[in-house]
């Protein structure tokens, strides 16, 4: 199939491009490079020795999106493009609502016009709000604690309503947890612009000496050691989950958790990274970030049953692959 990946130059999008190409699909990428680099697409072609068509566009631009659909026989869409920092969304709510919701609507409209009936949406575990863990797909979605989470909930509802009145429209909503790691080649990985918002790239840059010390946001959560607990998943496991969702789509809308089903605290992750890299990490505990919750991990039974997918790579592999990429990448 020829698949349009929005946000395909980003961290998860680029690894999913690799997984799609490995599975024999053709890829078109749309990305405005606001939090990514075109360099990444070149590295994907290096890994796979396959050509990728790239459009430097913002997918809130309806005319630019329509140009892609009119020039390519797109058979499916995987929609990653969107602003994604929880803390920043609290500070810039209007920017998040506009970008994340309009992009979903523009893409869904193009799919209806060009009869593209396969749509995979990049959602998040944040939609569960402060439900009890483990999070299960059948849970009622509680109000989230930040605008980023609200944009994911709203996008899910938009797609649900479209699928309800368009029976042939097949949607897979993937609520995934905390991706870390990198491609095993060390050629692509998480490459944020500026100071990272996510834990692992911040941690690797501290290990490399690019940043002085890691900031841990809060040590008074009701968890095993007071730091936040998350379900960390290797980015290539996550990428393969997107391929499984695309290839196993049936009519209607379907919701899946993509995680490992295991919670790891921030301090446990730091310890695992120290063991994988052999480097001691300096850190300081600071105040909690707005919008963060204490516990977040998945029930992953549904994805295993319906998609035949489970996460295979452990936390040590995630840390080792992240560190390999940090050491390989020279041009920050």
Image (cartoon, grey):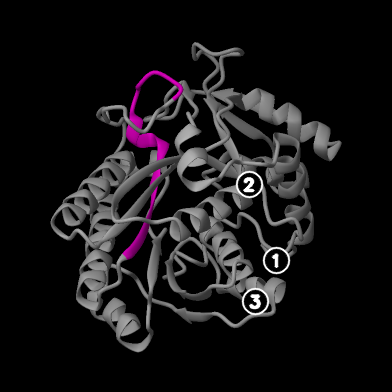
User: Quick check: marks 1 and 2 in contact, CB under 8 Å?
Assistant: no
Q: Residue 207: x, y in percent?
A: 76, 42
Residue under pointer 3: 45
* Residue range (magenta): 118-134
Disc 3/disc 2 C-alpha distance (Å): 23 Å
Residue under pointer 1: 331
Instruction: Tell me the number on the disc at residue 201.
Output: 2
Residue at position x 65%, y 76% from top?
45
For marks 3 and 1 on the same chain, the one whose residue lies earlier in the sequence: 3
Q: Nearer the viewer, residue 213 or 10?
A: 10
Q: Nearer the viewer, residue 193 or 79?
A: 79
Left or right: residue 29 compared with residue 186: left
Circle nearer the viewer, 3 or 1: 3
Q: Residue 85: x, y in percent?
A: 42, 45
Residue 131 is inside the magenta segment: yes
Disc 3/disc 1 C-alpha distance (Å): 18 Å
User: Quick check: marks 3 and 1 in contact, CB under 8 Å?
Assistant: no
Circle nearer the viewer, 1 or 2: 2
Q: The residue tagged with tag 3: helix, strand or loop?
A: helix
Which of the 4 image quadrants contains residue 185? bottom right
Left or right: residue 213 compared with residue 31: right
Residue at position x 32%, y 69% from top?
59
**Residue 305, placed above or below residue 263:** below
User: Quick check: marks 3 and 2 in contact, CB under 8 Å?
Assistant: no
């Amino acid at each position: 199939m020829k698949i349009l990946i929005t946000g395909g130059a980003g961290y998860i999008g680029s690894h999913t491009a690799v997984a799609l190409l490995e599975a024999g699909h053709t890829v078109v990428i749309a990305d405005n490079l606001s939090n990514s680099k075109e360099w990444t697409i070149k590295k994907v072609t290096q890994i796979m020795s396959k050509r990728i068509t790239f459009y430097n566009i913002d997918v809130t631009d309806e005319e630019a999106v329509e140009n892609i659909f009119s020039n390519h026989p797109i058979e499916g869409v995987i929609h990653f493009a969107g602003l994604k920092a929880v803390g920043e969304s609290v500070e810039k709510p209007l920017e998040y609502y506009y970008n994340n919701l309009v992009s979903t609507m523009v893409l869904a409209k193009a799919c209806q016009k060009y009869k593209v009936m396969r749509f995979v949406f990049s959602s998040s575990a944040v939609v569960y709000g402060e439900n009890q863990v483990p999070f299960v797909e059948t849970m009622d979605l509680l109000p989230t604690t930040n605008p980023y989470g609200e944009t994911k909930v709203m996008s899910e509802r938009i797609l649900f309503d479209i699928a309800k009145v368009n029976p042939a429209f097949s949607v897979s909503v993937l609520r995934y947890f905390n991706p870390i790691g990198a491609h095993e080649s060390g050629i692509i990985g998480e490459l944020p612009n500026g100071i990272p918002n996510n834990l692992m790239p911040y941690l690797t840059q501290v290990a490399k000496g690019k940043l002085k010390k890691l900031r841990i946001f809060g040590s008074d959560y009701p968890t095993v050691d007071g730091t936040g607990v998350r379900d960390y998943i290797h980015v290539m496991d996550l990428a393969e989950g997107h391929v499984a969702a695309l290839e196993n789509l049936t009519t209607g809308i379907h919701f899946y958790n993509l995680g490992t089903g295991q919670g790891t605290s921030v301090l446990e992750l730091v310890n695992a990274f120290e063991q994988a890299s052999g480097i001691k990490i300096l850190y300081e505990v600071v105040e909690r970030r707005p919008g963060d919750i204490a516990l977040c991990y998945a029930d992953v039974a549904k994805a295993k049953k319906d998609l035949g997918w489970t996460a295979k790579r452990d936390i040590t592999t995630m840390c080792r692959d992240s560190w390999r990429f940090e050491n390989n990448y020279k041009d920050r």
